[in-house]
Amino acid sequence: MTNRRVLWFALGLGLCVGLILWLVLRGGLAGKGDGVRADDNPLIDKVRSTWRAEDGETAEEIFAKVATVAHFVPRGWEVGRKTDTGERVVFSWAKHRSDKTTDENMVMWEVAPDGTAKLVTLYAKPMELGWQAFALSLVVDEVANNERGVNRRFLHDPANFNFVTTAQGKLGDLLRRGRCTIGEPVGVHYSPKADDQQAAEDDLWHVELSVGCNVQGLGDGAIIFERPKRQDWEPQSVFAKLFATSSPGSWFELAVPKDPEAFEPTRRTLQK
């Protein structure tokens, strides 16, 4: 009987140790930095369920779509450090499955006391415009960093620029109607205000691309749009103004000067 009790005790102890190890590996007790992996945390659930891009997509819907076109391997959610203005929720991802934890990238939200979730990671701000804008920004970064296997086809598909809207219609649709092809460089990024003296509206989204249009009177040019928060897209280059103010059917009637200087802002941006 004594031996049986010892055996049952050993088995019970082994099960307890195994359960603890499983919880640690699952992430319930494991931490990274100041965060704790806990996919079922109420704070994480709030970000998952309440945060939305402008087109209504959730963060997880965006991540799933981005993973199909960019080097983007989801790693998971965690709760970050609490700040004076709210609590942090972090989503981690890597460019390659073999990347170590130290090589992971993070997308961070801050949840205010009233429950409002705000995306605070600057490079990820294109997410607010939808999955295509975020994917474009990541692919552009891959090009700049000479990543292997970059999905350049995604950069050159006009449909991916339909999140930019003008009085004449969506940018991608206009590019197709004008028989325009997209070249490089391409830029999609978010620019925060430079100092505390500027208003929040000074934050800008930038979209920059070079195009060649098979329309009489048009050649190669640069399309540059900017959008302050809570405002409409504003054309910043000659080609962009043409797209925003005239229908494709009238482009050939307009004398459009060559616009080589319009490429310079794009080049300077991508070289930073």
Image (tube, rainbow, N blue to C red):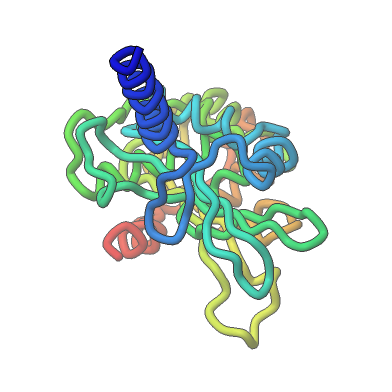
Q: Residue furthest right?
A: 114
- Compared to residue 255, the image places residue 10 above or below, namely above
The answer to whether residue 33 shows anywhere in this view is yes
Report which quarter residue 26 is drawn in.
Answer: top left
Nearest to the observer: residue 121 or residue 249: 121
Left or right for 225, reference 31: right
Image-based side of 260 in relation to 54, left or right: left
| Image quarter hosting the N terminus | top left
Q: Residue at x 78, y 54 (%)?
A: 115
Q: Residue at x 50, y 60 (%)?
A: 122
From what the image shows, is residue 237 above or below residue 176? below
Please tell me which residue is depicted at 21% across the width and 49% down the height of the picture. 145
x and y, in percent, of residue 225 in the image: 56, 53
Percent x, y for residue 210?
38, 44
Determine whether 156 is above or below 184 in the image: above
In the image, 79 versus 252, the foreground residue is 79
- Kindly tell me whether residue 237 is visible in this rendering: no
Residue 90, image x, y percentages: 51, 50
Quadrant of the image for the C terminus? bottom left
Q: Is residue 127 left or right of residue 118?
A: left
